[in-house]
Image (cartoon, grey):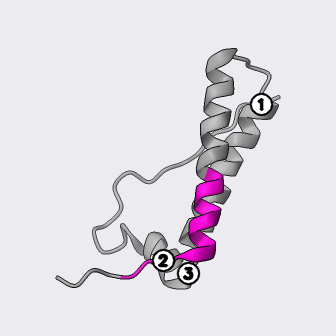
């Protein structure tokens, strides 16, 4: 099995830095997008050949809980801008 690599652009232009974030917030699917990303990590942890014992179980439990909370937020809440 070959390793999985993620490319992260660490220095985007200021005006483009939050484009993807704002797109998902404005589309109303930010919480579910986060849950999906966490789900990718969770699946990788579950299927990885590397095993870390109790700490792995803890991380899987935490990630599963966060995914459930994000799904709840997606179903019941909407992000709006603050009045400044």
Task: Estimate how packed mark 2 is, as few (under 14), some (14 to 19) or many (20 or more) residues with alpha carbons within 10 Å.
Answer: some
Quadrant (top left, top right, bottom left, bottom right) of the C terminus? bottom left
Q: Residue at x 27, y 68 (%)?
A: 14
Q: CA distance from mark 2 to mark 1?
A: 34 Å
Camera-near label (2 vs 1) is 2
Residue 17 vertical placement versus 46 (above, below): below
Nearest to N terminus: mark 1 or mark 3: 1
- The Cα atoms of the two marked residues, 1 and 3, are separated by 35 Å
Residue of label 1: 2
Mark 2 touches mark 3? (CB < 8 Å): yes
Q: How many marks overall? A: 3
Q: Where does the image place residue 40, in percent across and percent down from the top left?
A: 70, 48
- Which region of the structure is painted magenta? 67-80
Q: Residue at x 33, y 81 (%)?
A: 81
Q: Residues within 10 Å of mark 1 (few under 14, many from 20)?
A: few
Q: Which mark is residue 44?
A: none
User: Which circle marks residue 28 in the picture?
Assistant: 3
Most prominent secondary structure in the magenta stretch? Answer: helix
Q: Is residue 80 left or right of residue 82?
A: right
Seen at 73% across and 18% down, the residue is 51
Relative side of 18 to 46, left or right:
left
Q: Position of residue 15 (x, y in %)?
A: 30, 75
- What label does residue 25 carry, if any? 2
Q: Nearer the viewer, residue 35 or 74?
A: 74
Residue 45 included in the magenta stretch of the image:
no
Compute the Cα span from label 2 to label 3. Answer: 5 Å
Q: Is residue 6 above or below residue 81?
A: above
Q: At numbered mark 1, what does the secondary structure look like: helix, strand or loop?
A: loop
Image coords of residue 69 (percent x, y): 59, 57
């Amino acid at each position: 099995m070959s390793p999985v690599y993620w490319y992260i652009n660490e220095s985007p232009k200021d005006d483009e830095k939050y484009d993807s974030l704002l797109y998902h917030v404005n589309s109303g699917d930010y919480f579910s997008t986060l849950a999906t990303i966490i789900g990718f990590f969770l699946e990788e942890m579950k299927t990885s050949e590397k095993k870390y014992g109790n700490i792995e179980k803890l991380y899987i439990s935490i990630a599963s809980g966060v995914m459930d909370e994000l799904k709840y937020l997606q179903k019941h809440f909407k992000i709006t801008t603050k009045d400044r």
